[in-house]
Image (cartoon, rainbow, N blue to C red):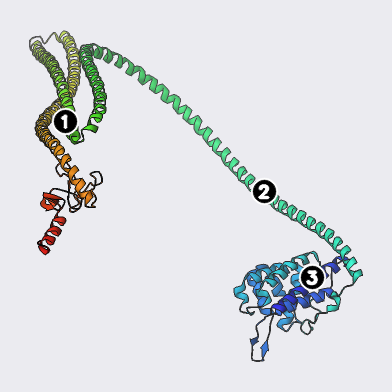
Amino acid sequence: MAMERANLLNMAKLSIKGLIESALSFGRTLDSDYPPLQQFFVVMEHCLKHGLRVKKSFLGFNKSLWGPLELVEKLCPEAAEISASVRDLPGLKTPLGRARAWLRLALMQKRLADYLRLLITRKDLLSDFYENSALMLEEEGAVIVGLLVGLNVIDANLCVKGEDLDSQVGVIDFSMYLKNDIDDYRSEERNSQIASILDQKNYVEELNRQLNSSVHGLQGRVDSLEKSNSKLIEELAIAKNNIIKLQEENQQLRSENSLILLKAQQQLELTQGDVTVERDTYKQSRQGLDEMYNEARRQLKEECQLRQDVENELVVQVSMKQEMELAMKLLEKDIHEKQDTLIGLRHQLDEVKAINVEMYQKMQSSDDEMKKKNNMISRLEEKTNQITATMKQLEQRLQEAERHRTSAEEGTRRFKLDFANKADSLQRQIEHREKQLQQLETDLKIEREWRQTLQNDLEREKDTVAQLSTEALQINGLKKEFHRLQDENFQLKTICEDQEQALEELGSKLSEYVYFMISETQTYCVMLFQGGQVWLKDKDASHCKLCEKEFSISRRKHHCRNCGEIFCNSCSDNELPLPASPKPVRVCDTCHALLLQRCSSNPA
């Protein structure tokens, strides 16, 4: 199968090359009687038949090319015309004839390479018609399809109706491909001519494609511009109609606006006269209260400024204190490096002292603020008393006005009873008295408004008093916290003093013990090294070897005089005489057990 594929590929190359050369030298469209073209179709028929599966039918076994070629119609809708025209041909009765007609029509369309390329890509469909090692399923089929692209240069005009495609015998004529030297020379000239012609044709085709694409683009633009132009014309007509309607509405609105302006001006003139009268009366009555309110506000601002100044001073003092604390801490670090055992307790004492100083300063500042706030509360109470006094005076004035009114009413009644003949004069007096009553009523309204404003001011001052009381409660809470911290400070001081005394006692005992141990360790080390044992250094051990507890001030290090390892007091609280030392020495628990076993086994 591999040899057959290679031979068919070579034959396809020769037939396609010979067809292109002969067609270009021929110089016109090819007919169906042209021998190289007939040989090309025979070679293509052999290539398509290679590896074709045999289908069983009731008449016998059959190899059909028409089956795989029909699939092109499903893969490419443009091939539907060829397949439909092939089915409509009257003289074709066999599938082989239909396949031959399809090849000729595809060549005339110059789409033979495209159709076969689509067919090769779908190997899952071709596997139903071809065997696994067929030419159409291998790489040789792709090479042949690539060679067929060159046939687009050829123009063919084939008559399919008159030919007997069913009974043709497909035999390859090899005599056409046997060449001599003269043919080789001619073929070189032809190849050069063919190359130049092909270049020109490709250039013309590319120009034609570019022009077609530009024409299509311009036509699309023209259509879009025409549509947009029609839309703009419609929108212009609608906009003109809207402008006309808006102009009419604008004229109507202007006329209505002029009428409204005239009415508004008349109303404004009337209201301005009333407002001027009311404004004069209101200004006269408001001046006294404004002066009192401005004085109170000014005093509040001064007190707020004083409070801000005090707070700023506190912030500066706190920052200075923090800087001093940082400097003290830096100095203390050098001291703590030499005294590792007292770092924690002294640090806690410093922090507690700093907290005490801060709380003392806060207490002083809070006491000052409490005094200031008490002074403010007293001042505000005095102001409230003044305001209540003014309110009482206003109420007295109201009562006097009501008395005058009652007396005036009684006088009018008496005049009506006594002097009936003097009605005109009495009516004038009554009108005068009614005007006075109206003025008194307006005064009453104004005084009521003053009373409301004063009540609002009183409520605001009450709110400030409530805020000050809450701040006083907070200060009392701070005092309690300060006393609690003082108690804690006293307790910590007592604890610290006790621990310092214990440490001093431990230090004195340790110094005595160290001097004593240095003298003994020297002798023991000499004896142990003579016995061949290793004496572990203190630096190399941080935990007990038996219980693995960490050494500290309370848990001291002790060497076993037998093995040389370091243990705690509980794990080395044993004494036995050793061969190197006549008196009993400290021994760990393990060495103690081993030595006791040895003594029990060897009593001598």
Q: Residue at x 69, y 74 (%)?
A: 83
| Residue beneath disc 2 | 221
Task: Specify the amino acid type for callout 3.
Answer: Ile
Label of residue 16 in the image: 3
**Contact between labelled residues 3 and 1, with CB atoms less than 8 Å apart:** no
Q: Residues within 10 Å of mark 1 (few under 14, many from 20)?
A: some
| Residue at x-position 74% and y-position 56% | 209
Q: Is residue 167 left or right of residue 494?
A: right
- Provide the secondary structure element on which disc 2 rests: helix
Q: Going by the picture, which residue comes out furthest to the front?
A: 604
Q: Reading the chain from its start, which is encountered first: label 2 or label 1?
A: 2
Q: Compared to 233, does 270 lie above or below?
A: above
**Tag in front: 2 or 1:** 1
Image-based side of 102 in relation to 467, left or right: right
Q: Point out which mark residue 349 bears.
A: 1
Measure how far apart labels 1 and 3 are at the Cα level.
Answer: 107 Å
The front one of 331 and 264 is: 331
The answer to whether residue 527 is above or below residue 438 is: below
Q: Quadrant of the C terminus?
A: bottom left
